[in-house]
Amino acid sequence: MSRIVILHGKPGREEYFSDKYPSGSNSHWIPWLQKQLLMWGYDVQTPEVIDAYKPDYTIWRTEFERHLVEHPMVFVGHSCGAGFLVRWLSEHPEVSAEKVVLVAPWLDPHRSDTTDFFEFDIDPRLDERVGELHLFNSTDDMESIPISVETLLTELKNVVLHEYDDMGHFCFNDMGTVEFPDLLTCITGGAGR
């Protein structure tokens, strides 16, 4: 059975240092999805990146790579975590994956929140090394996400787009729930338990 690695996004500094919010790997739909996948028998890891509010690629890479095993692997990333996956896979052409799922992928197109975190070229053959490449997007997301989505759809040809009108950034406040059944179905292929 595949190992699944679910990578959280970049919280704001205030959120990161507040007791009012859970850690990134325990936010939004991630714990619900992890529990569902565990019940399906998957090996599921949800890395927690230290100082995630100020993205440092070396720190993210080190934490992510601690969870890698022999294939098959499935990667799921939310926001900055999705952008990280695109960079990491682009820089590791020797790596293939069973499935990659990008939820509200963010590449910081204006470089407003990162320094060199997203200074890389997308490997135009990345999608050839991935069994399935899925992208979840909502048309009511923040302004920089559509730019990132368009970049990915232009650079990568074999992307399955899951588009919504009312999911915002796929956070709890936007969705009104921690449950994300469409994402679960995407990962499992709809197979029964």
Image (cartoon, helix red, strand yellow):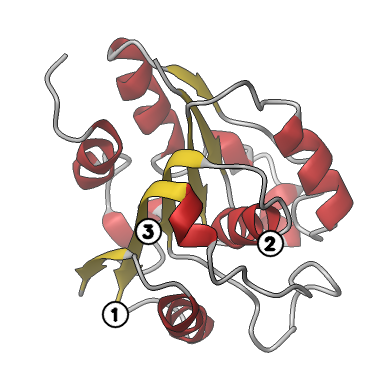
Give the amino acid at mark 3.
Phe
Residue designated by label 3: 170
The spot of residue 141 in percent (x, y) is: 39, 76
Viewport quadrant of the N terminus: top left
Residue closer to the observer: 102 or 124: 124
Q: Kindly identify which residue carries mark 2.
A: 12
Describe residue 119's horizontal placement relative to residue 101 as left or right. right
The mark closer to the camera, 2 or 3, is 3
The dot on residue 121 is none
Which amino acid lies under the numbered mark 1 shown in the image of this protein? Answer: Thr
Q: Which residue is mark 1?
A: 139
Q: Nearer the viewer, residue 22 or 136?
A: 136
The residue drawn where x is 81% and y is 60% is 54
Q: Residue at x 31, y 79 (%)?
A: 140
Instruction: Using the rendered view, name the quadrant where residue 87 is placed.
Output: bottom right
Up/down of 103 relative to 76, above or below: below
- Label 3: state its secondary structure: loop
